[in-house]
Image: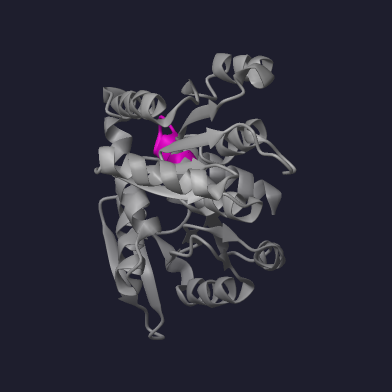
Amino acid sequence: MYKSILIIDDEEQQAKNLKEALSKSLPDCKFEIASSEEEIESKINHYFFLIAIVDLRMDGRQTDGIGIIQEINERNPIAKVIAVSAYSSEYAEALKKLIDGRNIFRFSSKSSFSTWLPELEEIIKDCFLQFEDNHYIGQRALLSYYNDAKNETDTFKKGQSFEYFISTLFSNMGYSRIRMRVKDRSSNEVDLIVRNETTDLFLNKFGKYFLVECKNKPNEAVGKNDFIVFYNKLRNASSMSELGILCTSGYIARTTYLEAMRESQGEKKVIFLSNPEIVRMITSDNIREEFKNILDEQVKDN
């Protein structure tokens, strides 16, 4: 398992010190930090992590650690949160609600570094032990693939690894014939073509093939032009495909949604799988049913 941990603390130096210390004691973990409001927002939205260590006190900020934890729960429901503070009494009531609602894995009271660090290390180890539980075995491979793809820095490997991940995601839905980097008669290259053969009567209505475009842009929006290019590929597929799936590790720009709504009256339909939808599918008990739920929602919205 790729053990990715995000440290959120408004004191940048404290976050750096904690990252440095934990990196030495837990060398199999990868740590990222976020301190400014902009950085925290960006990392929560676009960086994939399994554990978040969140300092509750955020002096002079629009939101405190409680608000940040609620955002994490909404945007990355897989992640387990370790709340930390030297001022636990200030947050006692809010903490009780979050712990009772299972929004927080554990609370750790800050003390002297030499005493606090070993305690925090044990909490992190306990946290990963839960991910190792049998319930997560099926999700673990997908989590690892997705995590590696989003955080890949090599330009060539970045696109390829995300395509492999999306291919694996569809394999988990029961699709066994998936081709990569296919050129159609117009020499348009499609990232993935999925042969739509399952026992699912609902999905089998969407033509013989799904066309899939993959954009590994965790920190960027998929723009209107990306949609237009892909939609034209779908049009060129004739009657062989009625459904296109535009996948991104980041998010979809508002102008892209508006363009999709303009084209929604045609026979062809494009579904968006951005970071929130992908996380929903990974964490669901039934990936195919969750995919169908997303289809229902986006058809209804358009």
Front-most of residues 16 and 294: 16
Relative to 204, is 298 on the left or the right? right
Instruction: Provide the major secondary structure of the magenta segment.
Output: helix
Give the colour scheme of this rendering: one colour
Front-most of residues 171 and 98: 98
The residue located at (37%, 23%) in the rendering is 119
Q: Quadrant of the C terminus?
A: bottom right
Residue 292 inside the magenta-drawn segment: no
Front-most of residues 89 and 205: 89
The residue located at (60%, 44%) in the rendering is 10
Q: Position of residue 179 (x, y in %)?
A: 28, 65
Q: Quadrant of residue 189?
A: bottom left
Residue 285 inside the magenta-drawn segment: yes
State how many labels appear. 0
Q: Position of residue 67 (x, y in %)?
A: 67, 34
The residue located at (57%, 45%) in the rendering is 11
Q: Is residue 197 visible?
A: no
Q: Quadrant of the N terminus?
A: top left
Q: Quadrant of residue 137?
A: top left
Front-most of residues 45 and 26: 26
Q: Position of residue 48 (x, y in %)?
A: 44, 48
Q: Residue furthest bottom?
A: 186
Relative to 238, is 120 on the left or the right? left
> From what the image shows, is residue 4 above or below residue 125?
below
| Magenta region | 280-287
Q: Is residue 110 visible?
A: yes
The residue located at (45%, 27%) in the rendering is 112
Q: Position of residue 101 (x, y in %)?
A: 57, 18
